[in-house]
C-alpha cells in the first residue's frame, strides 16, 4: 500500500489480485493538473539537470516521449553553434503561439547575427544586414517606439 507516500491523493481502489494499475495515473482518483506526457518530460528534464543523461535517454526511448521535438533540438543546436542560416531553417519546423512571437524570435536571431558580423570586422556586411534584415524583423516584432530604440542601439555598433 503506497497511500502513505501520497496522503493527499486517494486511490481508486485498493490493489487486489484481479486489479493491477497500469500506471501511477491509474492509481489516483483526482484530476491531475498535467498530462502523462508533461509528467514524463518533467522527469526527463530533471534527470538531465542532475546528470543522469543515460537514464533520461532510456526513459525517452521506453516512453516514446521526447523532451523536445527534433525541430527544437536542431534549432537549439544551431543557436548554440551561432549558425544563422541553420537557425532560420530550423525555425520552419517550430510552432509559435502567434506571428508576433515568431517575429520576435526572428529579430533576436537576426540581432545576434548582426553582432557576429560586427565582431568579425565585417562592417559593410553588417550594415547591409541591418538595413535589409534586421529592420524588417524589428518592425514586425515591436511597437514603433521600441523599434527606433532597438535599431539606434544596434547602429551605434557600426
Image: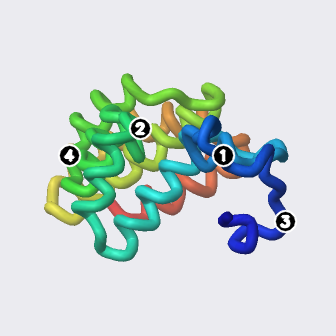
Q: What element carries label 3?
A: loop
- Per the image, the residue denoted by label 4 is 83
**Distance between the Cα atoms at labels 3 and 1?**
22 Å
| 115 lies left or right of 156 | left
Snapshot quadrant of residue 54: bottom left
Left or right of residue 28: residue 115: left
Q: Can residue 131 be seen in this view?
A: no
Q: Could you give the CA–CA distance between mark 4 and mark 3, rounded to whole angstroms?
A: 49 Å
Residue beneath label 2, please? 65
Q: How far apart are marks 2 and 1 (CA)?
A: 30 Å
Q: Circle 2: is it few (<14), some (14-19), or many (20+) Cα within 10 Å?
A: some
Q: Which of marks 4 and 1 is in front?
A: 1
Could you tell me residue 121's position as x and y percent?
Answer: 15, 61
Q: Give whichever of discs 4 and 3 has the lower sequence position.
A: 3
Its colouring scheme is: rainbow
Secondary structure under tag 1 reads: loop
Q: Residue at x 74, y 65 (%)?
A: 3
The quarter of the image holding the N terminus is: bottom right
Q: Which of marks 2 and 3 is nearer the N terminus?
A: 3
Q: Mark 1 points at which residue?
A: 16
Q: State yes or no: discs 2 and 3 in contact (Cβ < 8 Å).
A: no
* Percent coordinates x, y for residue 55 in the rendering: 29, 61
Q: Nearer the viewer, mark 2 or mark 1?
A: 1
Please name the residue that numbered disc 3 is placed on: 8
Amino acid at each position: 500500500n503506497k497511500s502513505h507516500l501520497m496522503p493527499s491523493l486517494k486511490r481508486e481502489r485498493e490493489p487486489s489480485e484481479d486489479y493491477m494499475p497500469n500506471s501511477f495515473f491509474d492509481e489516483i482518483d483526482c484530476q491531475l493538473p498535467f498530462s502523462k506526457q508533461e509528467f514524463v518530460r518533467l522527469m526527463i528534464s530533471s534527470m538531465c539537470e542532475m546528470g543522469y543523461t543515460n537514464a533520461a535517454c532510456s526513459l525517452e526511448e521506453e516512453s516514446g516521449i521526447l523532451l523536445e521535438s527534433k525541430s527544437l533540438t536542431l534549432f537549439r543546436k544551431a543557436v548554440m553553434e551561432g549558425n544563422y542560416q541553420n537557425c532560420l531553417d530550423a525555425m520552419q519546423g517550430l510552432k509559435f503561439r502567434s506571428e508576433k512571437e515568431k517575429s520576435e524570435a526572428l529579430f533576436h536571431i537576426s540581432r545576434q547575427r548582426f553582432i557576429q558580423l560586427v565582431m568579425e570586422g565585417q562592417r559593410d556586411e553588417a550594415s547591409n544586414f541591418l538595413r535589409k534584415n534586421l529592420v524588417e524583423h524589428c518592425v514586425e516584432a515591436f511597437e514603433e517606439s521600441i523599434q527606433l530604440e532597438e535599431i539606434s542601439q544596434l547602429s551605434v555598433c557600426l
